[in-house]
Amino acid sequence: MKGYLTIITLVVIIVTANIDILCPRDRGRDFGDVLEEQMNLCSVVYYTDSNFGFKVPYPALFIPDKSIPDSVIGCSRFSYDNVINMAIDCYVCRNEGYSDADGGISWLAEKMRAEVIEDKGDVFLHGPLTEDGGRVDGYSHFTKCVAKDKLWVIYSLTYPDMYADRLLRLFSMVRTWQPWEKGTTP
């Protein structure tokens, strides 16, 4: 009897140890699917810059970054920090040293190590994310640049490369963004 009890105990231990092989557990949905669904279904919130008057749309899942000092004007950041990190940045910079917008955009592209994409009068920069002169592996940015007098108003999405095909709504937000409603530029 004692031998049967030992054999049954060993069988139970072996079966329990190999239960995932015999009956695999559902691992849940792929994170990319969940991320795409979240980005497509969440509402869009708008931030209006109090100094320059431009509007910035961002998904409600992104959180405004409070670490930017009040002394920095014309700059806002919205972050999504979950399993991955994404950010939407909007800021104003001067087109210093260039008499035309083309010279300024070339300088920005060089500084950001990005390629310039012109589409229907809009200017975009796309390339790998860089920080302190080096590339941040696995991350890129897609940026829209709008010239206003001697200023550039920049709207940029920083995203992980492996989920780029899941973030089409965010890319569309960048492509269609207009800093000011028609007829309301300051």
Image (cartoon, rainbow, N blue to C red):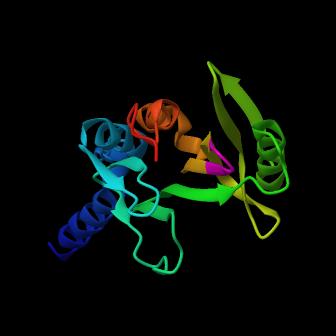
Q: Which residue is rendered at x = 43% and y = 50% of the image? A: 54
For the residue pair 133 and 135, the one nearer the viewer reads as 133
Residue 46, percent from left and from top = 31, 50
Q: Is residue 172 magenta?
A: no
The relative height of residue 120 versus residue 148 in the rendered view (above or below) is above
Q: Main secondary structure of the magenta part?
A: strand
Q: Is residue 149 magenta?
A: yes
In this picture, residue 118 sits left or right of residue 107: left
Q: Which residue is rendered at x = 34% and y = 63% of the image? A: 63
Residue 108, percent from left and from top = 77, 50
Residue 44, percent from left and from top = 28, 44
For the residue pair 163 and 123, the one nearer the viewer reads as 123
Quarter of the picture containing the N terminus is bottom left
Per the rendered image, the range of residues in magenta is 148-152
Number of dots carrying numbers: 0
In this picture, residue 93 sits left or right of residue 135: left
For the residue pair 55 and 126, the one nearer the viewer reads as 55
Which picture quadrant has residue 133?
Answer: bottom right
For the residue pair 136 and 104, the one nearer the viewer reads as 104
Residue 34, percent from left and from top = 33, 43
In this picture, residue 95 sits left or right of residue 53: right
